[in-house]
Image (spheres, rainbow, N blue to C red):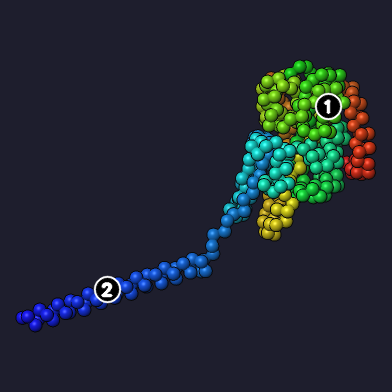
Amino acid sequence: MKKAAVWLLALCMVFAFAACGGGGSGSGSESETAGEGEATAEGGEEAAVEPLVIKAGHVETEESPLGQSFIKFEEWIEAESGGAIQVDVYANGELGGDRQVFEAVNLGTVQLTVGGNGALTQYDEKFALMGLPFVFDDKEKENAAMTGAFGDRLIDWLADYGFKCFGFQYDGARSISNNKRPINTVADMEGLKIRVMDSDFYVRLFQLFGANPTPMSFTEIYTALSQGTVDGQDNPPSLTYDSKFTEVQKYYSLTRHIYAESPILANLEWWNGLTEEQRSILSEGIETWLHSWQRETAMSLEDEYVQKIRDAGVEVNELSPEGLQSFKDAAQPIYAEYQEKLGDVYTDLLDLAK
């Protein structure tokens, strides 16, 4: 019996050692299996690719034609790229005014924007030629020039300053709102404090009109109007209405002194660094939504926006031919001044405009 007990104990010890050895072997197998799994994840499966993130900003509301074009662009790009390109849009001046956002695009901290052309004069005074008053008789002639050789020349210039320009959005015919009186002739501008874009060109133009121009960022206009810091502002109907300036203005006079255009801009170095596939998708989206759709929509809705301004309780008045001519006469010195400053550039661009 004792021998049997001893043999039984010995047998148990053998099984115990075997179990320990098997456990060590199993642990080693798990480690090897985990290693093989990691190799599969790294080598056998494609690693997750981070999407290309595009930071885009503008000063307008999401309801405006410009704002809607960015919403449609964002949706289309993300769907078309299958999520490989992500667009983050910052509206309502969240990234700053036009001048600040242009600077950010130029530095590459923001990739895409559409903004008022007046802010481009910080790079070169020749960009003021985009806003010369009364160059075009109507929006149809202006549209033909901006989508033709005139626009092409501007696109070439912008590349010299580090911008990739994809064309221009149509802002509309700039006209003047204020709280003092209807503007029927240039004489009615005398003494009015009018907010203008932060541009020497716009300051000079409104001085010629007899006003007291006050340059400030677009994001400050509503507060300045409501507090009486300025009496009025000049913007197209859509921007005047969508920005709710009708809440703090009494009169809107259809001077149509400038048919406003806003360049669609990206950082040129960033653009050139994208893959061919990325540029192809983005080019199609920009042309479809930020360019063609926006221009067609903004032009077709311009008269509706004038009516919306009326319906909001603002007195809207058309200028007589004589009243309009008084503005054209007052603006004459600015043509001579910029021709002297820019020389052949001035002549060439106006020839293209015609």
Calculate the distance from the C-alpha at mark 1 to the C-alpha at mark 2: 93 Å
* Residue 141 visible in the snapshot: no
Q: Which mark is residue 293?
A: none
Give the secondary structure at mark 1: helix
From the viewer's side, name the closer residue of 166 and 295: 166
Toward the left, the furthest residue is 1
79 relative to 309, above or below = below
From the viewer's side, name the closer residue of 144 and 169: 169
Mark 1 Cα-neighbour bin, 10 Å: few <14, some 14–19, many ≥20: many
Instruction: Give, as a three-letter code, the residue at label 1.
Output: Phe
Q: Earlier in the sequence, mark 1 or mark 2?
A: 2
Q: Is residue 342 left or right of residue 286?
A: right
Instruction: Give, as a three-letter code, the residue at label 2.
Output: Cys
* Residue 11 visible in the snapshot: yes
**Residue highlighted by disc 2:** 20
Toward the bottom, the furthest residue is 3
Q: Residue 244: percent from the left, percent from the top?
A: 66, 27
From the viewer's side, name the closer residue of 137 and 101: 101
Mark 2 Cα-neighbour bin, 10 Å: few <14, some 14–19, many ≥20: few
147 relative to 240, above or below = below
Q: Residue 264: percent from the left, percent from the top?
A: 74, 44
Q: Which residue corresponds to the image point at 83% horizontal and 36% vertical from the top-left?
A: 131
Disc 1 + disc 2, Cβ < 8 Å: no
Quadrant in which residue 320 is drawn: top right
Give the secondary structure at mark 2: helix
Q: Residue 239: percent from the left, percent from the top?
A: 71, 31
Q: Which residue corresponds to the image point at 29% horizontal and 75% vertical from the top-left?
A: 22
Q: Residue 189: percent from the left, percent from the top?
A: 83, 20
Q: Which residue corresponds to the image point at 67% horizontal and 47% vertical from the top-left?
A: 109
Q: Depth-wise, is mark 1 or mark 2 nearer the camera?
A: 2
**Residue highlighted by disc 1:** 206
Q: Which residue corresponds to the image point at 82% horizontal and 19% vertical from the top-left?
A: 191
